[in-house]
Image (spheres, rainbow, N blue to C red):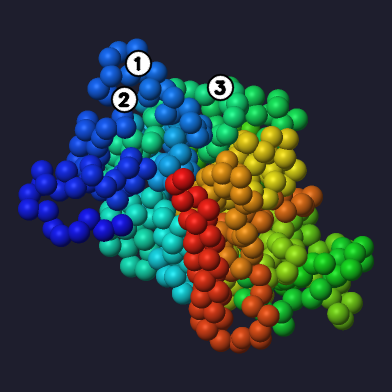
Amino acid sequence: MSIGKPAKSFSHFQEKILDICELSFYNRFSTLGYRVLKTKTPNRADGLPGAERAEGVERRMEKGLVTVIGAGLAGCEAAHYLARHGFSVRLYDCKPNKFTPAHSSKNLAELVCSNSLKSGDVWGNACGLLKEEMRLLGSLVMEAADATKVPAGGALAVDREAFSAYITERIRSDPNIEYVPEEVKELPQGYAIVATGPLTLDALAEDIRAKLGGALHFYDAAAPVVSAESIDYSKTFTADRYGKGEGDYVNCPMNKEEYEAFVEALVSAERAVAHEFEKGEIFEGCMPVEVMAARGRDTLRFGMLKPVGLYDENGKRPYAVLQLRKENVAGTAYNLVGFQTNLKFPEQKRVFSMIPALKNAEFLRYGVMHRNTYLDSPKILSADLSLKTDGTVFFAGQMTGVEGYVESADSGILAAMNCALKMRGYAPAAWDCGTVSGALAHHVCAETDNFQPMNANYGILSPLGLNVRDKALKKRMLAERALEKVRENAADAEDELRAE
């Protein structure tokens, strides 16, 4: 759409906007432009008397209305996507009347842990690639991050207050979004997207648990995941304990000297500091490996590093052994079995790399230990992120089983896209594991007996089908394939969602 020749004055510019733009196209213009539209656009009901005006506003909001619960990164992305495609959105959040234990700002999309959105490298990092995928999909989070970024080397870091303020202004000033500062205590009726995060307030969490048959799980720990191709297999052997299995585990042996050095480093390593609400009961099975190690020098040899029932190709039982288990069907990533940890990420890299087979390991996901809640998504969510029992209610964000700021925001876009397509009578977008967005969505919904949250990494992408030894070239080829697919999906969705 073209405005034509430059306006002679701002008032002239206002008039040109009013002449050619409908409310659904507000996001192309400034907040000041919106205020002009709000007060002067003919199809608004502002000029009508009391009751008639209220009725007109309500009619417009109910037509194509989507309820979004939670104004974090995923919720704001969902609301933004729907609003700019002509849908009316009613966005609920408990702020500023109530806060979770982790939140303190009255602004929306608050970054509570860090101001970093991780790598900005599109061609050499999976999270950097995911950011570019989101930009192609019109991401508000990426728009805000790019506008409020601070120097951080190869990472994309932001001024977190400016970042949240930017998103808050965009959401609160959008004419298609009605912000409702209320706590929602039960799942809504009709089309809705639930994006209340890992600290969903008790009343709604209880309602979700009751209505989904107890499918809301508490997530207390996760072990690190490493890239399969970064493991030194010359220092491993494949075997299952007591020979039970088909060689599903890759075993990383340590001799006495290596084991004792590892334990000493593990016990003295710097740990992440937990908030008070994260210091509650920890199940013994989820105890951090560094806490177990502090109980005694040989504790790990009788626990997660026990060698009993394992023998190498020479029939010798190692002094201690770490087992690695496939993280996905393709075998491109491996989980460090039993290595739940609360160490800071750099310390995990330093200490766990002391295990000979992991000396040069690439960590696709670091271990975490904190209070969290997430859905048993494979059992309750369809491929489009809607409930299997109610196709009008979608879920997005960390509660679906994705990890990280960027991953959570991306799921908000996908849930909104699928919701919008369904409301217009179209099939969900054709996402596959060739894109990071699609691979994360697939991970969330794919049937499994041991569902664990996941972040962006190359291990979840479908293989290229080519033997490419150059790692940099391989990552670039994966990125080019992903971005081409995202462009196709974005264009298809835009065609189908074009305002009627």
Q: CA distance from mark 3 to mark 1?
A: 31 Å
Toward the viewer: 222 or 474?
474
> Which mark is in front, 3 or 1?
1
**Is residue 156 in view?**
yes
Could you tell me which secondary element the residue under label 1 belongs to? Answer: helix
Measuring from the top left, give residue 210's x and y in whole percent.
70, 25
Residue position marked by numbered label 2 in the rendering: 45
Could you tell me which secondary element the residue under label 2 belongs to? Answer: loop
Q: Which mark is residue 52?
A: 1
Relative to 302, residue 132 above or below? below
Residue 107: which quarter of the image? top left
Toward the viewer: 58 or 320?
58
Relative to 1, residue 398 above or below? above
Report the residue that reaches farthest toward the left.
8
Mark before the other along the chain sequence, 2 or 3? 2
- What residue is drawn where x is 61% and y is 86%? 468
Measuring from the top left, give residue 447's x and y in whole percent.
76, 52
Residue type highlighted by circle 1:
Glu
Measuring from the top left, give residue 459's x and y in whole percent.
63, 68
- What residue is drawn where x is 49% and y is 62%? 491
Measuring from the top left, give residue 410's x and y in whole percent.
50, 52
Mark before the other along the chain sequence, 1 or 2? 2
Q: CA distance from mark 2 to mark 3?
A: 31 Å
- What residue is drawn where x is 75% and y is 65%? 329
Residue position marked by numbered label 3 in the rendering: 185
Toward the viewer: 328 or 76?
76
Question: Which quadrant of the figure contains the N terminus?
Answer: bottom left
